[in-house]
Image (spheres, grey):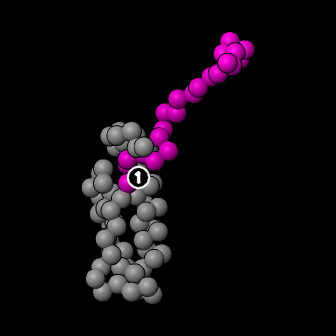
Amino acid sequence: MANLNAKSVTMALKREPKYPSRRAYVLKVRSDAKPDALAGRLENLVSGRQLEFASGPELLDSIAADLELSADDPSLDLTDGR
């Protein structure tokens, strides 16, 4: 049996979950999209913000833009984000 008194284990609680809910998205790809012509809509599940994109780079730009908008607003994180 291990000696539990030998060392004290410290646990730190993280304030920010690894996957916060404000960074959860639905990605809808248009029916006419192709690998070289990606197009669709990105929707933030917490804020409801919808962003259209017409290419892979625009999709990445949409995600980056939404992250910038929500970065300063932790109140958008309504769940624990497991």
Q: Magenta segment, which residues?
A: 1-24
Q: Main secondary structure of the magenta part?
A: loop
Q: Circle 1 sits in a helix, a strand or a loop, which is it? A: helix
Q: Which residue lies furthest to the right in this view?
A: 6
Crowding at label 1, few (<14), some or many (≥20) Cα neighbours within 10 Å? some
Asked if residue 69 shows in the view, the reply is no
Taking the spot 37% from the left edge, 47% from the top edge, the residue there is 21
Tell me: residue 50, above or below residue 39: above
In this image, 8 relative to 66: left or right? right
Q: In which quarter of the image is residue 78?
A: top left
The residue wearing badge 1 is 23
In this image, 28 relative to 81: left or right? left
In this image, 72 relative to 13: left or right? left
Q: Which residue lies furthest to the front in this view?
A: 1
Q: Looking at the figure, which quarter contains the N terminus?
A: top right
Q: Indicate the amino acid at tag 1.
A: Arg
Q: How many numbered circles are shown?
A: 1
Residue 62, how many percent across, how many down? 41, 66
Q: Looking at the figure, which quarter contains the C terminus?
A: top left
Taking the spot 43% from the left edge, 63% from the top edge, the residue there is 63
Asked whether 46 or 80 is in front, the reply is 80
The magenta stretch spans residue 35 = no
Residue 27, how many percent across, how many down? 34, 67
Residue 49, how many percent across, how many down? 29, 58
Taking the spot 62% from the left edge, 22% from the top edge, the residue there is 10
Taking the spot 40% from the left edge, 58% from the top edge, the residue there is 66
Asked if residue 39 shows in the view, the reply is yes
